[in-house]
Amino acid sequence: MFVRLSAAIAVMSLLSSFALAEDAKLTDPQISHIAYTAGVIDIAAAKQALTKASKKEVKAFAEGMVRDHEAVNKLALDLVKKLKVTPEDNDTSKTLSKNATEKLAELGKLKGPNSTRPMSPTRSPSTRPSTARWRRRSFRMRPTRS
């Protein structure tokens, strides 16, 4: 979950970065740099998750992310070389890198089993409706067949 949420944070940073550069028209070299930067950020988040995770499922997911994103970045570099495009640094990729560095540093300070809690998209068990109560509600809401 840590890795998935870190990736979500990177995507949100990327989207907010695009909002900053909304008026500026991005070129292909700039877009290639942004895509590569996003991949590097995902790899860093996955490696951080590997050092913090204790569940084997999380570690397996993080290892898969590192493997997959490194492969994609290698393919992207091969493609830009083939197309003779030089990735160009830009404000969007700089903002993306800056935001990710700050977030990874913040997450790196967290310790213990609750280290992913600040990022958890789900509510705590005490605030969730019980499953039985939810089932009763959903059963009552179903339309009847004639």
Image (tube, grey):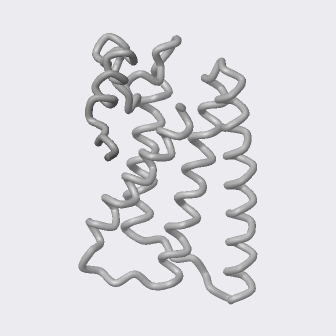
- Is residue 17 toward the left or the right of residue 53 in the image? left
Q: Is residue 128 above or below residue 97?
A: above
Q: In this view, does 2 lie above or below 124?
A: below
Q: For the N terminus, give its image quadrant.
A: top right
In this rendering, the answer to whether 64 lies above or below 89 is: above
Residue 129 on image: x %, y %: 30, 18
**Between 113 and 101, the one nearer to me in the picture:** 113
**Residue 43, placed above or below residue 133:** below
Q: Residue at x 69, y 30 (%)?
A: 59
Q: On the image, which quarter does residue 137 sit in?
A: top left
Q: Which residue is drawn at 33% across and 29% down?
A: 139
Residue drawn at (42%, 71%), measured in percent from left and top? 90
| Residue 91 x %, y % | 37, 67
Quarter of the figure with residue 133: top left
Extreme bottom residue here? 83
Residue 131, image x, y percentages: 39, 18
Q: How many marks?
A: 0
**Residue drawn where x is 51% and y is 76% of the image:** 88
Front in this rendered view, residue 123 or 58 = 123
Left or right of residue 23, residue 96 in this image: right
